[in-house]
Amino acid sequence: MPRWDGKHPDKAEIEINPLYARGGATQVPRFELAAHGILPDTAYHLIHDELALDGNARLNLATFVQTWMEPEALQLYIDAAGKNIVDKDEYPQTAAIEDRCVKIIAGLWHAPDVQGVLGVSTTGSSEAAMLGGLVMKRRWQQYRRQQGLSVDRPNIVFSSAVQVVWERFANYFEVEPRFVPVSVDRPQLTADGVLQAIDDRTIGVVVVLGVTYTGVYEPVEAICGALDAYQARTGLDIPVHVDAASGGFVAPFIQPALEWDFRLPRVLSINASGHKYGLVLPGLGWALWRDRALVPDDLIFDVAYLGGHMPTFGLNFSRPGAQVLLQYYNFLRLGFDGYVAVQQACQRAAQFVAAGVQRLGPFHLLSDGSDLPVVAWRLVEAPKRLWDLHDLSHLLRERGWQVPAYPLPPDLQDVTVMRVVVRNGFSLDLAQLFLQDLERAVSSLEKLEQPLPHHLRSQTAFHH
Ligand SMILES: Cc1ncc(COP(=O)(O)O)c(C=O)c1O
């Protein structure tokens, strides 16, 4: 095989470490399927070594997604790796456990009748959100047809700080997205903003429990109240879907008095990511509807199950079943108290980081960990400053910390923020070390006599 000249990457080969170069193979093509295989430990080490270049998950303060589970959970993961969630008949116990998880979550979210909810596991909140949007669209169409009204030009309302999945939903399912603009003072959806955006073609309003940019909860109860009053005035019944991707497994444990869920009759459906604060490795999401009867039958497909049939609803067909079992593992392992302890520890660390950031001086906090355990801040304006949050992100990266700096959503894109997402395992000890590094980075940036060269400026925008 020709050796790589550095100019034709598609011809590149990967050298095999001599210790593993058994069976004659000393290299494998990088971008083509090799004519012959290699031994399993050779393949393992080759990939394992490359992964050393990935970031350290423990220092990844950018993601909401779980990066660690304890060894017993990993054993279960391996045991269940071959289970396909769609084969309900072949893996009836996995299906039964999925159903138990749905009922446990329905209880956490105060469904009026836990037995009556429709709930499904999904690959993540994105799939769950698509399903939530689809039900609202189909229900709106059914209602309009019954009334003899046109089903043209449906719209869906959310804030301009909504996660990108909702733009995707609107695009893929041909629904006009109506973005309620956010402002510096109110960087989330408001009841007034919703009332200005809705009309008789609104299929639903999406309220986010834990805005991705800042971790702040949108006011679900106030928005539901405004929609109740709107219905009393106009007769139009506009449902609410709560995108609780992160908050769905936080609020029940550390803000139990907050009414954001099925306690509010207007909340039709809720999604959450099992792989975020549900504490399961990726990818797992959940979508629940308060009552099976509210989901149009034509969206449900029956599959064979124990000699009978079972209703299913989802975008995917085959999908790993292991994550569902890991969710159940967490429910058994932690119980209610355990989740409270984990989320409280996250919140304590977040509030500790927030206080430290505030003390450092040049920052203004946008969130302090009181809602999601997330801290977001921006730089206070200073005319002579030679650095920005992208530079700070770059310096922190040198110490291994991954902390994104990114612009706020469209109406506020001139404002750049930095965000720390505190997840299980980011202890107070790590938080203290992080603050020390932050302080060091800020003080070395403050000493700059000219701006950093452009190529050293990080443009990280990782903030989903
Ligand atoms: C509010 C919100 N909704 C939806 C999503 C998408 O979730 P997933 O990554 O589970 O598909 C995210 C991801 O961060 C989110 O923050």
Image (cartoon, rainbow, N blue to C red):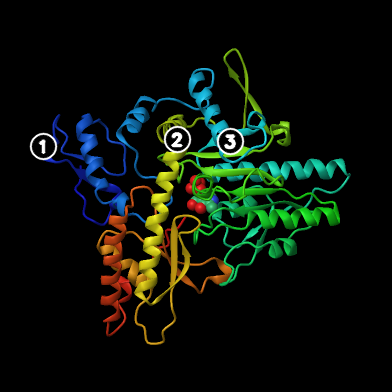
Instruction: Name the one closer to the observer, 373 or 67.
Output: 373
CB under 8 Å between callouts 2 and 3? no
**Which picture quadrant has residue 460?**
bottom left
State how far apart marks 2 and 3 are (Cα).
13 Å
Residue 35 horizontal/vertical position (percent)? 27, 32
Q: Are marks 1 and 3 in contact (CB under 8 Å)?
A: no
- Give the residue displayed 37% in from the left and 69% down from the top: 357
Mark 1 surroundings within 10 Å by alpha-carbon count, few (fewer than 14), some (14 through 19), many (20 or more)? few
Q: Earlier in the sequence, mark 2 or mark 3?
A: 3
* Mark with earlier residue (2, 1): 1
The residue sitting at 65% across, 33% down in the picture is: 117
The mark lying in front, picked from 1 and 3, is 3
Front tag of 2 and 1:
2
Queried on whether the Cβ of the residue with tag 3 lies below 8 angstroms from ligand 1, the answer reads no
Is residue 57 visible in the rendered image? The answer is yes
Q: Is residue 65 visible?
A: no
Quarter location, residue 136: top right
What residue does disc 2 label? 335
In percent of width and height, residue 398 lies at: 25, 63
Circle 1 residue: 19
* Residue 65 to residue 35: above or below: below
Residue hosting label 3: 107
Q: How many marks on residues? A: 3
Query: Label 3 amino acid?
Result: Gly
Check disc 1 and give the amino acid type: Leu
Q: Position of residue 26 (x, y in %)?
A: 15, 38
Q: Considering only order in the chain, which callout, 3 or 1, is on the residue closer to the N terminus?
A: 1
Please provide percent x and percent y for residue 285: 51, 40
Q: Is residue 63 left or right of residue 33?
A: right
Describe the element under mark 1 as helix, strand or loop: helix
